[in-house]
């Protein structure tokens, strides 16, 4: 999330987010061992019609795109870096679960501006 105290900067930040000039990276601890090297995950995410608080992968959902990289494997889990190219609700959680590597922990890194 990005908040600005001044309306001018909020509009500036919104525009940069919309045009993908701000890179959104996360570090997550997932269950099991992974071996991701720039693995691109494309899935459609929608609200679960049986549980309104839950998001699921569904053919009629909105497209979500992420890039996964394994940073380190531990005994029963893996530390991964996730770069999201879209911003869907619970995107990382849903995509990790779909790969049979549910989240154990997630850390949100500082946003960085891409020089394009």
Image (cartoon, rainbow, N blue to C red):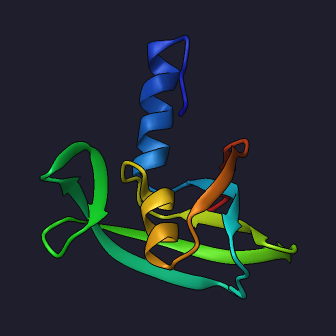
Residue 77 percent across, percent down from the top left = 76, 70
Specify whether residue 25 is in view: no
Residue at horizontal 67%, vertical 49%?
Answer: 106
Q: Residue furthest front?
A: 76
Residue 24 percent across, percent down from the top left = 60, 53
Horizontal arrangement in the rendering, residue 108 relative to residue 75 (left or right): left
Say which of 29 and 92 sits in front. Answer: 29
Say which of 20 and 52 sits in front. Answer: 52
Residue 38 percent across, percent down from the top left = 65, 84
Residue at horizontal 55%, vertical 54%?
Answer: 21
Horizontal arrangement in the rendering, residue 22 relative to residue 50 (left or right): right
Say which of 17 and 76 sits in front. Answer: 76
Horizontal arrangement in the rendering, residue 8 relative to residue 104 (left or right): left
Instruction: Determine which quarter of the picture holds residue 74.
Output: bottom right
Q: Is residue 25 above or below residue 57?
A: above
Q: Is residue 58 above or below residue 4?
A: below
Horizontal arrangement in the rendering, residue 91 relative to residue 73 (left or right): left
Residue at horizontal 69%, vertical 76%?
Answer: 32
Residue 108 percent across, percent down from the top left = 67, 44
């Amino acid at each position: 999330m990005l908040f600005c105290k001044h309306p001018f900067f909020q509009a500036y930040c919104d525009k940069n987010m919309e045009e993908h000039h701000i890179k959104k990276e996360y570090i997550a601890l997932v269950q099991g061992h992974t071996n991701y090297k720039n693995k691109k995950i494309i899935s459609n995410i929608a609200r679960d019609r049986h549980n309104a608080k839950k998001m699921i992968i569904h053919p009629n959902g909105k497209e979500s795109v992420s890039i996964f990289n394994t940073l380190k494997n531990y005994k029963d889990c893996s530390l991964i870096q996730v770069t999201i190219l879209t911003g869907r609700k619970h995107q990382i959680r849903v995509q990790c679960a779909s790969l049979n590597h549910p989240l154990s922990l997630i850390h949100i890194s500082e946003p960085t501006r891409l020089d394009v």
